[in-house]
Amino acid sequence: MLGNITMGQYYPTDSVVHRLDPRVKILLTVAFIVGIFLVHSLWGYALALAFVYLMARLSRVPFKMLMRGLRPLRFILVLTFVLNLFFSGEGTVLWQWSFITITHEGLSKAVHYCLRLLFLVIGTSLLTLTTSPVSLSDGLELLLSPLKVVHFPAHELAMMMTIALRFIPTLLEEADKIMKAQMARGADFESGNLLARAKAMVPLLVPLFVSAFRRAGDLAMAMESRCYRGGEGRTRLRVLRLTLADLYAGLTMAGFVALIIVEGLLV
């Protein structure tokens, strides 16, 4: 299961999407999320699926890798579907038994929220898979830099988010090693009820937290030894510049959002 989590991972390859300006990719991801919230029919989700498939092909990220990242969300998706299916009492009744009632509106709402959650995760995964942590930090800091006039800590916030994303794969790898070591000593993480499984996770969580605090201390010591004092006066190895490809990407996303709005007006 740990290997199925793709958030925070970077897929290095040479593609059109990888070469886009990170500021543009962040804004396009926000626009995609807004567009998903404007979808109100299956036709809109079909359009979103075609758009995601096109971006995956252009980025050369395997579509199976995006789908693999959805596996850890199975429980959340099932819970979302069940809650909306059985607890939406209004609308045309499709099936009823005792106190359990399934309505047409409840079924539509359950499918709607599950698809929305799926596309939100896929969209944000495409951002992290096609943007290195350093580029993501630079883009986020430059986007937030106008807020420095009100003393907003743009550099510190971008640094914290980048470090958090960077440490996700590291902590997952560490958790996998600890889990295999505990299983070699006879630990069982699969059998038993929910409470038993939660208790079985204690031998995994304690060393993982110790390792995370140790890594955080090592990182702080390394940054201090290199005289890190924040973003004031810092320069960048790669200066971000907008290109025609960024303009075309923005126009493509604007066309997608426009089609979503038109589809919502026609429904």
Image: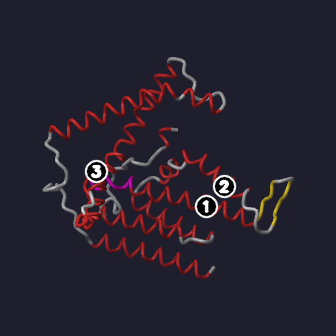
Q: Residue at x 45, y 47 (%)?
A: 6
Amino acid at circle 2: Phe
Q: Is residue 211 left or right of residue 188?
A: left
Q: Which secondary structure lies at badge 1?
A: helix
Q: Residue at x 84, y 58 (%)?
A: 96
Marks 1 and 3, how far apart in space?
32 Å
Q: Is residue 163 left or right of residue 197?
A: left
Labels 2 & 1 near each other (Cβ < 8 A)? yes
Q: Position of residue 263 (x, y in %)?
A: 57, 78
Q: Main secondary structure of the magenta part?
A: helix
**Vertical arrangement, residue 204 with respect to residue 239, above or below:** above
Amino acid at circle 3: Met
Quadrant of the drawing holding the C terminus: bottom right
Is the image coloured rainbow, by chain, by secondary structure, or in one colour?
Answer: secondary structure
Marks 2 and 1, how far apart in space?
8 Å
Q: Position of residue 30 (x, y in %)?
A: 42, 65
Which residue is labeled 1 in the image? 113
Mark 3 vs mark 2: in front: 3
Q: Is residue 177 left or right of residue 195?
A: left
> Which badge, 1 or 3, is on the more N-terminal residue?
1
Which residue is labeled 2 in the image? 81
Q: Residue at x 54, y 18 (%)?
A: 186
**Vertical arrangement, residue 164 with respect to residue 146, above or below:** above
- Which region shows up in magenta? 128-135
Is disc 3 surrounded by few (<14), some (14 to 19) or many (20+) residues within 10 Å?
many
Which residue is labeled 3 in the image? 159
